[in-house]
Structure formats: C-alpha cells, structure tokens
Amino acid sequence: MMLERIIHDPNFLSLVCGAGAFAIVVLIWLALVEDSPLEDRLKSVAEHRHDFADREEKKKPSMSRRERLVGTDAIKSIVQKLKLEQGKQTNKIRIKLAQAGFGSREAVMIYLLVRLALPVIATVVAFFFLFIVQAVDEAFLNKTLYFGAALLGAIGLPELFLKNASQKRLAILRKAMPDALDLMVICAEAGLSLDSSLSRVSREMAASCPIMAEEIGLTGVELGFFPDRSQALQNLADRVPLPGVIGLVNTLIQTEKYGTPLAQALRVLSGEMRNERIMAAETKAAKLPATLTVPMILFILPPLFVVLLGPAILNVMQLSK
C-alpha cells in the first residue's frame, strides 16, 4: 500500500523524470567529451616518482615530509584504529589493486575501508527498505532471503570489481606487449641501456597504449630508486602477471645478473612471443566451426528453412483448399 502511494505520488513521478533527464544529459556529455587517458597515466607515473622521492626524504631527518590530504589522513586513522592493515592479506590486496590499476599508497586503505563499510551500509539499507518501509510485499522468509542476498552481494562486490578491472587491464596489456618488446629490441640494438630503453619505450607507447607506458615508466622509475634492481623488475611481474611479461622479467634479471647481451636475449624472446601469438590465433581459428554450430542452428537454419520451404507450404495449403 505504501509503495503504491509512493508510485502514484506526482512528486515522485516528477523526481523520477528529473533523474532520468539528468542521467541522459550526463550520458550525452560523457559520449561527446573526449577522454584523454594519456595525461592521467603520465600523472600517475609522476606521482609514483614523487612517492619514491618522499621515501628517500623520510630517511633524512633534515628533510620535511610532504603534506597529505585531510581525507586521506582520516581514512588512514580509521584503518589504523580498526587494525585492518595488520593482516597477512594486505600484501596480496596491494598486488591485486596494482593489477587493477590502483597503485597509489592510499588505495589499500581506501579498499579496506570500503570492504568494511559496504556490508554495513547494505545491511542498514536493506533492513530499512525490507522491514521498516516494507517496499516489497513478500513473506518474512522471502524478505530474509533478500536481506541475505544483499549482504552477500555487498561482501563480494569489491572483490568482483577488482577482478573485472584486472581482467580488462590485462587484456589491454596483452595486446600491447609484443609492440613494447619490439621497441625494446630496437632500443637495445641501438646501444641504449636498460633504464634508457624503458624510458624511451614508455614515451613511444604513451600515445598507443597509456597503460603499458605507465607500467614501463614505473619500472624505469623503480630501477633508479631501488638498491636491488631485480626487485624493481619483479614488481613489474607482480603488477602484470602475463606469461610474456614474466618471461621478459626473467630475461632482464638474467641479463643484469650474468651480463648476457640484452639485444640478443630480447630478440629471442620477441620471436617466441610472436610464435605464441600465431599459435593462439590458429587455435582460435580452429575452434571457430565448433563455436558457430549453436548460433547457426538457432539463428541461421530456421530463417533459411522458412525462405526455402515457406512458398512450397503455402502452395500446398492453397491447393488443398
């Protein structure tokens, strides 16, 4: 009854129409405004560079610390009071956030706070609408099931969001990896060092794939700040867990450790990656007939039968009359 009153209320209808009009305007604006991810990626690399510089400055007592945002301090204080960042899963969460593209220092604290607050908010909202407002006219058992579904959805939503963002990001990086490796081969054959090669490849890849440019640029920054260069390369493998990137990291670590020629190692790795892409394309092409079987049976054969047999069936029906 209350839900019907709310629906038939003129103010409610006006509010819904206004929200719909606002959503349409926002969608049109987002479609027309040109998105420039390059500036955001370059800004992210610059922020990482400043973060590494701040870590070095913190070791010196004479240097002053950089001021933080008030909101970040509040989130950090809440996380520290609740002791959310002291678990063994913090490092794994940091790696998952980096794989999804959230590599800032505050990302872990924000994620932990959201993962804690979202089930509480979902519980309060679901209890309010189901048991107090009674927006759904169902039995108590069904309302309890809805309440449990809302709670479970709120618990699993952050992990699902991270997994989806990570998969999309890795798909983009997988497509751009061969081009980046070819550029590294060219830079190595030209006589550039590893740091110079990464910096050059990052600049060249900025227009075509800003995400790959960000990862390579961040690796170049870490090579300049970390005392252990293999740790910087291993961080790249942790952020981008692709077979090609892992092979590249192992090759670079071997080159740094044993002094093997960089250009020759990268050339062999580039050839192997090209062969893997050709084999993957051939495998996908071989699976195509089996994949098209079900769509052909459901969507292609019925119209074909109608076109071929339809006139004959109509003629037989007219002759039988």
Image (tube, grey):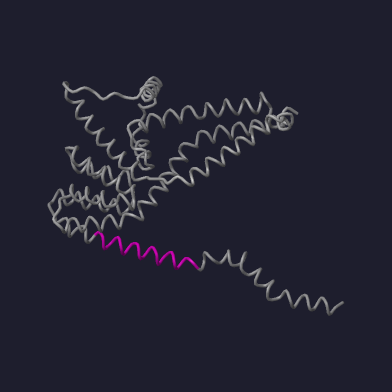
Provide residue 79's location: percent of width, then percent of height.
39, 24
Q: Camera-side residue: 272 or 68? A: 68
Q: Which residues are magenta?
A: 269-288
Quarter of the rendering containing residue 280: bottom left
- Residue drawn at point x = 39 percent, y = 42 percent: 100
In the rendered image of this protein, does residue 72 appear above or below residue 186? above
Q: Main secondary structure of the magenta part?
A: helix
- Residue drawn at point x = 12 percent, y = 52 percent: 259
In the rendered image of this protein, does residue 115 appear above or below residue 211? above
Provide residue 292's location: percent of width, then percent of height.
54, 66
Left or right? Give the position of 50 relative to 146.
Answer: left
- Residue drawn at point x = 61 percent, y = 26 percent: 127
Report if residue 303 lies within the magenta region.
no
Left or right? Give the position of 246 relative to 159.
Answer: left
Count of number-bearing discs: 0
Quarter of the rendering containing residue 164: top left
Left or right? Give the position of 227 relative to 25.
Answer: left
Q: Camera-side residue: 93 or 121? A: 121
Query: Image quadrant for the N terminus?
Result: top right
Query: Image quadrant for the C terminus?
Result: bottom right
